[in-house]
Image (cartoon, coloured by chain):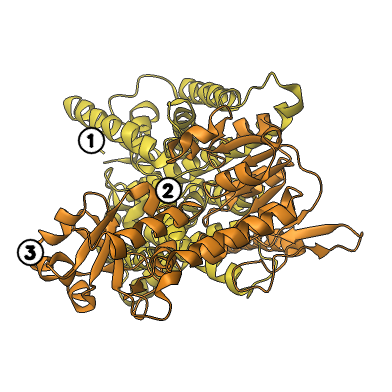
Chain colours: A yellow, B orange
């Protein structure tokens, strides 16, 4: 594929990028407004309106940031591996973040009971655990990459790390089963949820998402070159090793932020870039910002659905993103196949 | 080459900056939370309130947060354990809501006429009730408690539910919080006395060996030392055979169960067949003529609060008076 083909994108591009961005921004504003308006409380109650809006704004920010992080990470991972079916979980950092979060849940109970860490707010331990877990996975990935720096080895190491962390998660879950209340907390984390996002979690995740998103965009042109294949990219002057290293770092940081905000929220990194490629083309300079908006919109809308679906309690966010994401992804896949869409 | 090196440096600096800012946010959160104290979890000496520097009194909850003792007239319960205690100790007009599971309880009719809601997922509805105290068992999920506190609500986390000791402790804490400390103490003492009376006639004599077991799909879950199941078995006059090797809510494999081989198995209604008709587990003494599988209503057995009393009485009757019901 030539650079001009990348610029032009697939045959499905029908609208100028400006229109697509305007549409995404308008949809984002609409989704955010909806998220602020929809809730269990009544905004007509003047004495509680501020409190309700504050809670919804924090939840909205959490959902948007998590969606943005996952969608941008999805674009990066798909560009790096030249595979539209790749999701941010393939490099193992999602599983690392998830494992770190579960360990943090266990550690919170222990720290509270023993008073070992007096004054440490327990709600900070969970996101901190996620970030540490993802960074740990990233470290392991780099240790292997030092021995043999190759995209396939990176991919396989990612799969192995995912399998390892999932096994370790299983061990943590088995420990949590010894305490009923802990097993409930671990299960809740696995289902994905942004309803409990507060200012501290936002303050921890926001720098990771903002810096990660911005720096991801600076790798857009090199990633376009990578779409032509590693050898071709190298011949065009791309520093393939450097691209690979830093793109993996930003994928790890973005997924860590997303998991620390919403737990396991699936399908965002897979569906959103897929849905937007036909509209904005394959070029990463357009796809990354469009996916940042699209991911945010997708998760915010799913979170609104969580609130409006009837039930004694809310349907978990991870369930909704899966229920919406899986059929959407299948539809996109079939549609693109019919229209000869190729990555 | 120089441009490449600059890119590497910029990325490294930005990555470090992002992680550093994120870590600072966590540490800032830690310093803001420094007013918290070591929580009053089981093992602490007392549930008596402490005196603050301004002369007021306060209790410390399971998250280490101080809750001032002052008149409360709009109490909401987000805890299944606190529901019956509030009914027993507080004036009905002082209760604004019960927990989401209150209508599903065995005695759900007693909670009619008041809203029941899940404080973890219905924060806004809870705020609309304008509670001046919310009682919860956070069960390890603390972010939503912070949300409520940030919205100005006084939240008392009763902490984990580990059986009679934690429940009795919770009863006394609720008594203090709603301004009825004496009533709370009496209710707690009565509860314990009635529990102790159930198997009092056995004295120091031999007790039948038993084990709690839940059969879910292919899994065998227990409940022993450090759980309400263990306390219920013990107060019912039984010897928990799992307590020496296990604690909490262990998951057994069939071999472990055959090794423990209790004389009695306490389980939920309908589970005897799932246990005794499952291959080698039919060899358990409890499934044979000299043992027994005591089936008790699941809601009663799973109640880690007031229901422990009824559960212990029922199990004692099944184990010692009705013979080993099989």
Q: Secondary structure at mark 1?
A: loop
- For the residues labelled 1 and 3, the Cα–Cα distance comes to 54 Å
Q: Would residue B136 appear left or right of A94 to someone viewing this image? A: right
- Pointers 2 and 1 within a single chain: yes
Q: Would residue A242 appear left or right of B29 to someone viewing this image? A: left
- For the residues labelled 3 and 2, the Cα–Cα distance comes to 49 Å
CA neighbours of label 1 inside 10 A, class few (<14), some (14 to 19), many (20+): few
Residue at image mark 2:
A73
Please state the horizontal and vertical placement of residue B259, each as a whole percent of the image.
20, 78
Vertical comparison of B179 with A278: above or below:
below
Find the residue positioned furthest to the left. Answer: B279
Q: Chain of mark 3?
A: B
Question: Can you see residue B86?
Answer: yes
* Residue at 54%, 57% in the rendered image: A127
Marks 3 and 2 close (CB-CB < 8 Å):
no
User: Dividing the picture into quarters, in which one does residue A315 lie?
Assistant: top left
Residue A342: image tag: 1
Q: Secondary structure at mark 2?
A: helix
Q: Earlier in the sequence, mark 2 or mark 1?
A: 2
Residue at image mark 3:
B279
Residue A328: image tag: none
- Pointers 3 and 2 within a single chain: no
Q: Chain of mark 2?
A: A
User: Dividing the picture into quarters, in which one does residue B264 lie?
Assistant: bottom left
Vertical comparison of A81 with B64: above or below:
above
Please state the horizontal and vertical placement of residue A53, each as a whole percent of the image.
67, 30
């Amino acid at each position: 594929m030539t650079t001009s083909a990348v610029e032009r994108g697939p045959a499905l591009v029908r609208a100028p990028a400006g229109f697509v961005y305007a549409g995404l921004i308008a949809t984002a504003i609409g989704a955010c407004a909806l998220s602020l308006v929809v809730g269990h409380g009544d905004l007509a109650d003047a004495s509680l309106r501020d409190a309700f809006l504050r809670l919804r704004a924090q939840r909205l920010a959490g959902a948007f940031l998590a969606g943005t992080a996952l969608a941008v990470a999805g674009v990066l991972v798909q560009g790096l591996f030249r595979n539209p079916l790749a999701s941010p979980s393939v490099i193992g950092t999602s599983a690392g973040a998830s494992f770190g979060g579960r360990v943090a849940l266990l550690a919170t109970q222990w720290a509270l009971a023993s008073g070992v860490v007096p004054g440490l707010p327990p709600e900070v331990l969970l996101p901190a655990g996620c970030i540490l877990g993802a960074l740990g996975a990233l470290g392991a990935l780099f240790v292997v990459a030092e021995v043999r720096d190759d995209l396939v080895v990176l991919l396989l190491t990612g799969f192995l790390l995912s399998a390892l962390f999932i096994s370790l998660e299983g061990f943590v879950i088995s420990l949590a089963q010894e305490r009923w209340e802990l097993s409930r907390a671990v299960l809740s984390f696995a289902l994905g949820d942004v309803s409990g996002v507060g200012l501290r979690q936002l303050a921890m995740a926001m720098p990771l998402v903002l810096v990660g998103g911005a720096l991801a965009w600076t790798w857009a042109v090199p990633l376009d070159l990578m779409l032509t294949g590693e050898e071709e990219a190298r011949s065009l002057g791309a520093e393939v090793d450097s691209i690979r290293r830093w793109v993996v770092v930003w994928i790890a940081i973005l997924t860590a932020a997303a998991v620390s905000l919403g737990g396991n929220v699936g399908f965002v990194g897979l569906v959103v870039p897929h849905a937007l490629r036909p509209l904005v083309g394959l070029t990463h300079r357009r796809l990354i910002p469009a996916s940042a908006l699209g991911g945010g919109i997708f998760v915010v809308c799913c979170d609104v659905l969580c609130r409006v679906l009837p039930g004694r309690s809310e349907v978990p966010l991870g369930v909704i993103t899966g229920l919406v994401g899986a059929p959407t992804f299948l539809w996109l896949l079939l549609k693109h196949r019919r229209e000869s869409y190729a990555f | 080459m120089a441009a490449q090196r600059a890119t590497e440096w910029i990325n490294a600096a930005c990555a470090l900056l992002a992680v550093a800012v994120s870590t600072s946010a966590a540490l800032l959160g830690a310093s803001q939370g420094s007013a918290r104290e070591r929580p009053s979890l089981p093992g602490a000496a007392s549930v008596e309130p402490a005196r603050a520097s301004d002369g007021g009194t306060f209790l410390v909850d399971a998250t280490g947060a101080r809750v001032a003792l002052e008149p409360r007239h709009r109490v909401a319960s987000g805890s299944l354990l606190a529901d019956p205690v509030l009914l027993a100790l507080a004036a009905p007009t002082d209760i604004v809501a019960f927990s989401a599971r209150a209508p599903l309880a065995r005695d759900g009719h007693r909670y009619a006429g008041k809203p029941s809601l899940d404080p973890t997922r219905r924060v806004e509805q809870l705020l609309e009730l304008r509670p001046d105290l919310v009682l919860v068992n956070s069960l390890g999920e603390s972010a939503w408690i912070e949300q409520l506190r940030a919205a100005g609500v006084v939240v008392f986390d009763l902490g984990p539910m580990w059986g009679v000791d934690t429940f009795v402790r919770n009863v006394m804490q609720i008594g203090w919080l709603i301004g009825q400390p004496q009533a709370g103490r009496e209710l707690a003492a009565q509860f314990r006395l009635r529990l102790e009376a159930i198997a009092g006639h056995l004295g120091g004599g031999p007790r039948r060996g038993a084990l709690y077991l839940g059969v879910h799909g292919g899994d065998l879950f227990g409940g022993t030392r450090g759980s309400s199941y263990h306390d219920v078995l013990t107060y019912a006059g039984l010897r928990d055979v799992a307590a020496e090797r296990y604690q909490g809510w262990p998951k057994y494999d069939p071999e472990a169960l055959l090794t423990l081989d209790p004389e009695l198995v306490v389980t939920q209604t309908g589970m005897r067949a799932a246990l005794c008709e499952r291959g080698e587990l039919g060899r358990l003494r409890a499934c044979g003529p000299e043992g027994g599988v005591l089936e008790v209503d699941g809601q009663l057995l799973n109640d880690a609060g007031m229901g422990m009393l009824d559960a212990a009485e029922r199990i004692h009757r099944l184990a010692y008076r009705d013979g080993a019901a099989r």
